[in-house]
Image (cartoon, rainbow, N blue to C red):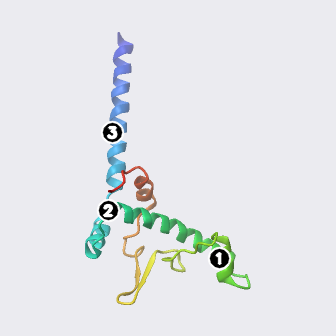
Amino acid sequence: MESNKSSGLTILLVLLAFGGIGKLISDLGKPTVEQQKFIDDYHYARPRTWLKSLCEEKTACEMYVDVRQQCATAGSISECVKIKMNGSVPNFCGDDGHIVINSLFTGRFDLTEKNIAPSSLQCFALNFVEKEE
């Protein structure tokens, strides 16, 4: 009789833990205050899709910094980077690995410094959040 109660309690605790983890991931998949303001200012219709693309860009930028250092002694840095990045050089990477947008109207806008670039934890959570339609 005692083992039935403990196994029922264990199942309940496991279900509560999964529910809590699901809620945490769902919350992490939502834009932060800074990100939401940027999304609203620039009228992005699909915030999660935009954040996911920033996560991909963030990964590419982190790789780009390492590749640039490896190519520092190459004869043609740009050609070396292109080869090591498998032909796809990221569009929005600064030399420091930050995600940067260069605009004719606003100049250099660093998404990482403005806390608009997603964190690694947020990027992880976005893999589990449902897609927007």
- The residue that label 3 is drawn on is 19
- The residue that label 1 is drawn on is 81
Question: Which dot, 1 or 3, sits closer to the camera?
Answer: 1
Q: Is residue 102 left or right of residue 105?
A: right
Q: Amino acid at mark 3?
A: Gly
Name the quadrant containing residue 28: bottom left
Residue 30 % position (x, y): 32, 58
Q: Earlier in the sequence, mark 2 or mark 1?
A: 2
Q: For the residue labelled by badge 1, is the local secondary structure a helix, a strand or a loop?
A: helix
Residue 50 % position (x, y): 38, 66
Q: Earlier in the sequence, mark 1 or mark 3?
A: 3
Residue 116 % position (x, y): 37, 70
* Marks 2 and 1, how far apart at CA: 32 Å
* Marks 2 and 3, how far apart at CA: 21 Å
Q: Is residue 96 left or right of residue 29?
A: right
Identify the residue at the far top of this view: 1
Q: Which residue is more in the foreground, 2 or 53? A: 53
Q: Amino acid at mark 2?
A: Pro
Q: For the residue labelled by badge 2, is the local secondary structure a helix, a strand or a loop?
A: loop
Q: Label 3 neighbourhood size at 10 Å, few (<14), some (14-19), many (20+)?
A: few
Q: Which residue is more in the foreground, 64 or 42? A: 42
- The residue that label 2 is drawn on is 31
